[in-house]
Amino acid sequence: MHVVKKIEIIANSFELAKILDSLDKSGIHNYAVIRNVTGKGLQGTTEDLDMTMFDNVYILAFCMPEQLNRVVENIKPLLNKFGGTCYVSDVMEIRSVRCVASM
């Protein structure tokens, strides 16, 4: 087991391609995207919107601690410009990301 950083991003789906491109530029090539996320934030609830263009997405990614500064440098300007939020936390990974398990 070892410590990795969990990156959680909630943003407008319209900006998804830009966010994923920023993750890729940061060296984060594996992630999960959950579409049609609803909730309540500073802008109110999102579940009552009729237009899917304004749906939110939830992006979940993990990185090594030494990669985090680069991720923040690339993601922060997008979130400041287009909105959204990003949370980072320490989690334990059971499987090593540096090795491929053999069968």
Image (cartoon, rainbow, N blue to C red):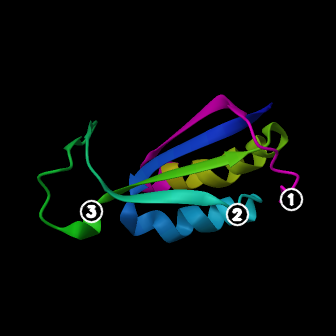
CB within 8 Å, label 2 to label 3 = no
Q: Earlier in the sequence, mark 1 or mark 3?
A: 3
Could you tell me residue 86's position as x and y percent?
52, 41
Residue position for label 3: 54
Label 2 to label 3, Cα distance in Å? 25 Å
Residue under numbered circle 1 = 102
What number is the disc on residue 56? none
- Mark 3 is surrounded, within 10 Å at the Cα level, by few (under 14), some (14 to 19) or many (20 or more) other residues, namely some
The residue to which callout 2 is attached is 29
SS at badge 2: loop
Identity, as a three-letter code, of the amino acid under mark 3: Phe
The amino acid type found where label 1 is placed reads Ser
Q: Nearer the viewer, residue 101 or 15?
A: 101
Instruction: Say if the magenta span includes residue 96.
Output: yes
Q: Quadrant of residue 3?
A: top right
**Coordinates of residue 42 in the picture (x, y in percent):** 28, 36
Instruction: Kindly identify the residue that appears in the image at 54 percent across and 56 percent down.
Output: 78
Residue 67: x and y in percent read 80, 46
78 drawn magenta = no
The residue located at (28%, 60%) in the rendering is 55
The Cα–Cα distance between marks 1 and 2, rounded to whole angstroms, is 22 Å
In the visual, does 55 lie left or right of 71?
A: left
